Image (tube, coloured by chain):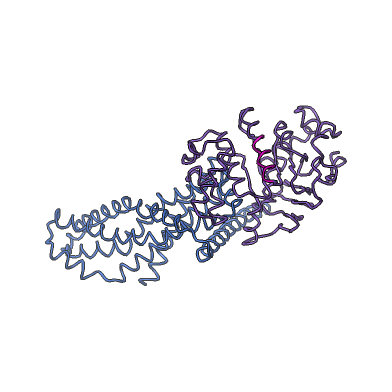
Amino acid sequence: MINDNKVAAGENAGTGSSGHTATPMIRMSNVKKSFGDKHILRGIDLEVKKGESLVVIGGSGTGKSVLLKNILGILEPDEGTIEVDGHVTTHMRGRARVELMHKFGMLFQGAALFDSLPVWENVAFGLIHGEKMSKGQAREIAVEKINAVGLSAQRVADLYPAELSGGMQKRVGLARAIATSPEIIFFDEPTTGLDPIMADVINDLIVESVKGLGATALSITHDMASARKIADKIAMIYEGEIIWCGDIKDLDNSGNPYVEQFIHGRAEGPISKHSDFAKSAKSKA
Amino acid sequence: MPFTLVLNIFAAVGQSFLSFFAAVGRLFVFAAKAVGHIFAPPFFGRITLKQFMDIGYYSLPVVGMTTLFTGMVLALQSYTGFTRFNAEGAIASVVVLSITRELAPVLAGLMVAGRVGASIAAEIATMRVTEQIDALVTLSVNPFKYLIVPRIVAGTLMLPILVLIGDIIGIMGGYIVSVHALDFSVGSYLKQTFDVLQAADVISGLVKAAVFGFIVTLMGCYHGFNSGRGAQGVGAATTNAVVSASILILIFNYVLTQVFFS
């Protein structure tokens, strides 16, 4: 019974490794989201403290991306409450939503760079259009951020995304995510599709960028090497619920059979018994 | 058993109607939202100008060729028919009225639907599939203002200009065939053209063009924005954009003709 193992993510945050303040930067309370008869999120309770890096792990189709999109406001929850920095944002729209987005930065799974713009303009996009900064000033910051993610701005700034490798695109995506110095950064499968060395480089850059900015980070991944590297805390999502949450140091002694099966990548275990759900949920998540 | 069968048929028909009205409702909401954003800042002037070029300037060869040959064919076909009744003198009138009132706006609309509507749908659908639209949201930019409004404004304003140029080229096509192939006198052909042409003929065509431009860009944006996943989703969005825009152009052409000329 997975419900026996369920916890509200962040409820034992006081014992977290990083000793952060008590005010949660992100709080999700009983968030539910369905697509037709597919119930993707079934009551998510999650807290991320200020300055903390929380990684949500879970298999494909378990609701990780939907969870992230609900916080960002790209999707709207059917039930429950989402708070960002103490403000309820669940159904926030219009100008208030745009203002809220200034707090966020996001690295997408496929980088999601704008094909029609050169690299520097991709990085400077949020500064030019969101922060209304002049192009010259925005370019200076973009060049700085491109260099900060280990690329040569002189070489790549005027190239178009299609001219870059996958790893380089991911770095540019990271540069764009941190360009506006956001308070909260989301990472959606940051290492998916990268070779192990490039994945480790991206992980290092994520840690460096998040700590450098003093930002709060919420990542979703099924790459355990990545999760171990970038997380202060880990939460596991399964069948649309957080079934375990704890410090990264406690991950290997979670005592939760679902977590143990997942982190060791075993085919046999409680998760395989519910594979039908995973398959059906995958079509929408 | 037959009663259940009849009920099932009614249920299927009813479901189809409900789906249709739901789709129409979604389209209306999308259109209203897009129009609402046209008048509210921020405005993306540079992107709108780029769309003026993409939708207007780059469509000029297609529209020009279409109206040129349509004017030429119209003169030839009219001549073939009218000689039976010794009414060759009416060819200039037929060419100028057909081109300005109907053919230039409708054919330009259909050609632009194929060229621009498909391109808009494919571009925006690809942006949807690759999460670029979500990225816009996370960068504090409203996708409606950045993607939809510039295209709809450019389509609505540029198609009348294209049609005006198409009018001139189409009439010139009829003139070339009439004067050089059918041996009409230059003076009498031009006189008849200008005698019969009224401002209302041109204006009605331009109003139609503006409506068709709105329809083409709206359908491209709507289907692209709401596309399904993967390559299949992008393909379906493109097809739906062109087909729905073409059908709506023909329907609205009838409605507007009824309004202007009945």
Q: Colour of chain A?
A: purple
Q: Is residue B134 left or right of residue A278?
A: left
Rendered hue of chain B is blue
Q: Position of residue A105 (x, y in %)?
A: 63, 48
- Write the residue at 18% across / 67% down: B192
Residue B168, how many percent across, how many down? 26, 60
> For residue A35: magenta?
no
Above or below, A198 relative to A3? above
Is residue A67 among the parts visible in the rendering?
Answer: no
Q: Nearer the viewer, residue B181 or A226?
A: A226
Q: Position of residue A170 (x, y in %)?
A: 58, 37
Verify whether residue A208 appears in magenta: yes
Q: What residue range appears in magenta?
A: A204-213
Kindly report the secondary structure that dominates the magenta region of the rendered protein: helix
Measured from the top left, where is residue A125 in percent x and y?
A: 54, 50
From this view, report whether residue A265 is shown above or below residue A179.
above
Q: Quadrant of residue B99?
A: bottom left
In this rendered view, identify the residue nearer to me: B181 or A67.
A67
Quarter of the figure with the C terminus of chain B: bottom left
B71 relative to A199 in the view: left or right = left
Q: Nearer the viewer, residue B107 or B145?
A: B145
Taking the image as drawn, is residue A103 in sight?
yes
> So how many labels did they put on this image?
0
Residue drawn at x 27%, y 54% is B70
